[in-house]
Amino acid sequence: ADNGTPLVVIASPAVAGTHYNFPALVFGILLIVVVIGGNVLVCLSVYLEKALKTTTNYFIVSLAFADLLLAVLVLPLFVYAEFQGGVWSLNTVMCDGLMTMDVMLCTASIFNLCAISVDRYAFIAVSIPLNYNRRHVDHRQLILLSATWLLALGVASPVIFGINSVPDRDPTRCQLEDNNYVVYSSVCSFFIPCPIMVLLYFGVFRGLQRWEETRKAKLRSSIEACRKLQHAAVATALPPLTGTIPGPLPMPLPRIIERDLAQSRLDDTGDYMQQEIPYPRQYRENSVPTVTFSQQQHMKKRAKINSRERKAMRVLPVVVGCFLFCWTPFFVAHTTRAVCVTCDVPPHLMSTVTWLGYVNSALNPIIYTIFNTEFKKFFKKCLRSCC
């Protein structure tokens, strides 16, 4: 998650150059260090850890990369201006570069979250749940990732082509000068994609909920069918005893069978629906279906992948929620300032909501550490090796 579109508004104070904001400098440096360190760990963990190589996490790497670029290209200039009390002391070319990167990286962050929602909705809520390649990025994911960054660049490109070059521009202020572009970029980067993203995530998790209920019902049905098969096998294996109780009572299904059945069926709907359960008659004909070792290994492998993918998806609502919490105030305040020229939006308020948006770039690695055990293990391992 990243920064804001019509971006950083660095306002000139009443007396330029007479006030230095040391708290902003200290906090800004700490924020840059945390953002870079945390998101580098995210990228390394997905690259090095086999358990983290899932489709969702590849999109998360793209999100972390946007945060890294923000910390390297945007935050240093923003912190420098804040330290000088909001005065922009560099040239307008640097300011336009800052605005371009800020708009692009914010848009890339939101579009990355949208790309995850589109990917998940199309292949979970609509198609067969979790029944596609989760280990490698295929052409579909590559197209989504490429489109994310190209569209983000497209939204930010007007700044590159001179929309900020207006007559009587104040060189001590670094901001987007065209109010129409402020509204355009806010709508394209936030107000349109965010509601779509929330609706798609709602559809995804509704689909997952229905899928979960269906597979649990099928699991119960399978266990019951296995019990019937066991009863038939026991009944045919032991000859009936005359004058006694007719036939042995079925023994409980061994726990290891129930556990393996639950593991393979519960974790993989695809394998589950494709396998048919034999009828008791097959036992009477001494034809007992078996599962080969290679099939068992394949089922366990797919079950692990499904489990990792679900863990990766559990963290997404928290990531999206934090992003909306951090960036909604900025976009609301920024758009209000552009649309309502008579409205008084204090510079301190704009500075506060901008800082809040940038803080979001440091939160995602913390979220992954709290909600994903694989990320947590890798982060601990890296920190131990560094210390």
Image (cartoon, grey):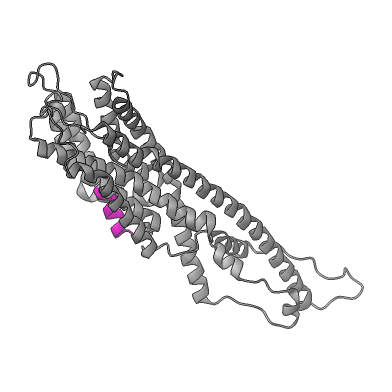
- Eyeballing the image, is 244 above or below 104? below
Write down the region rendered in magenta.
40-49
Q: Residue furthest top?
A: 14
Residue at image coords 36%, 56%: 144
Q: Which residue lies furthest to the front in this view?
A: 167
Residue at image coords 57%, 75%: 291
Residue at image coords 72%, 70%: 229
Relative to residue 202, is residue 171 drawn left or right? left
Q: Quadrant of the N terminus?
A: top left
- Eyeballing the image, is 297 above or below 176? below
Queried whether the magenta region covers residue 42, the answer comes back as yes
* Rendered image quadrant of residue 6: top left
Q: Can residue 381 be seen in this view?
A: no
Q: Which of 123 and 24 is in front in this view?
A: 123
Task: Tell me the chief SS of the magenta region.
Answer: helix
| Residue 88 screen position, x and y as percent | 11, 29
| Residue 128 screen position, x and y as percent | 54, 61
| Residue 96 screen position, x and y as percent | 15, 39
* Rendered image quadrant of residue 119: bottom left
